[in-house]
Image: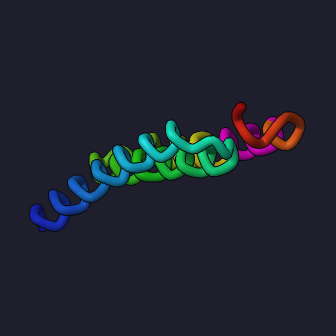
Amino acid sequence: MSTIITILVVIGALVLVAAAVFAVHKRDLVVATVATSVISLVLSLFYFLLQAPDVALTEAAIGVALTTIIFIVTIKNTKRFED
């Protein structure tokens, strides 16, 4: 069981780094926002693996759902592509 958790942590860390680099280099702000929500989703998985389900649920609700919706609405009212 410990090996599976270790593999999940390593894969999650690689996804975190890849999503962060992807979010920084994309000029389309909607794609960068989706990459940021992927980061929050992986972090909520990490919190769950660390046996903090309340923090995991809060991260998923705020980081993935609410923040992404606020960013998408804001981008809709401004320019989508970065200059």
Colour option used: rainbow
The N terminus, quarter of image: bottom left
Evaluate whether residue 47 shows in this view: no
- The verdict on residue 68 being magenta is yes
Above or below, 69 against 11 in this view is above
Task: Please state the horizontal and vertical placement of residue 79, each as a whole percent of the image.
Answer: 82, 37
Q: Residue at x 68, y 42 (%)?
A: 29
Q: Please tell me which residue lies in front, 18 or 51.
A: 18
Evaluate whether residue 65 shows in this view: yes
Q: Please tell me which residue lies in front, 64 or 14.
A: 14
Q: Residue at x 21, y 54 (%)?
A: 10
Task: Please state the horizontal and vertical placement of residue 9, each as a whole percent of the image.
Answer: 24, 54
- The verdict on residue 34 being magenta is no
State left or right for residue 52 relative to residue 55.
left
Q: Main secondary structure of the magenta part?
A: helix
Q: Please tell me which residue lies in front, 44 or 15.
A: 15
Which residue occupies the extreme right position in the image? 77
Quadrant in the picture for residue 43: top left
Which residue occupies the extreme top position in the image? 83
State left or right for residue 45 relative to residue 71.
left
The C terminus, quarter of image: top right
Which residue occupies the extreme front position in the image? 83
Q: Residue at x 73, y 41 (%)?
A: 81
* Part of the protein shown in magenta: 66-74
Task: Please state the horizontal and vertical placement of residue 64, each as a whole percent of the image.
Answer: 59, 48
Task: Please state the horizontal and vertical placement of residue 30, each as a whole percent of the image.
Answer: 69, 48
State left or right for residue 3 relative to residue 62.
left
Above or below, 1 against 68 in this view is below
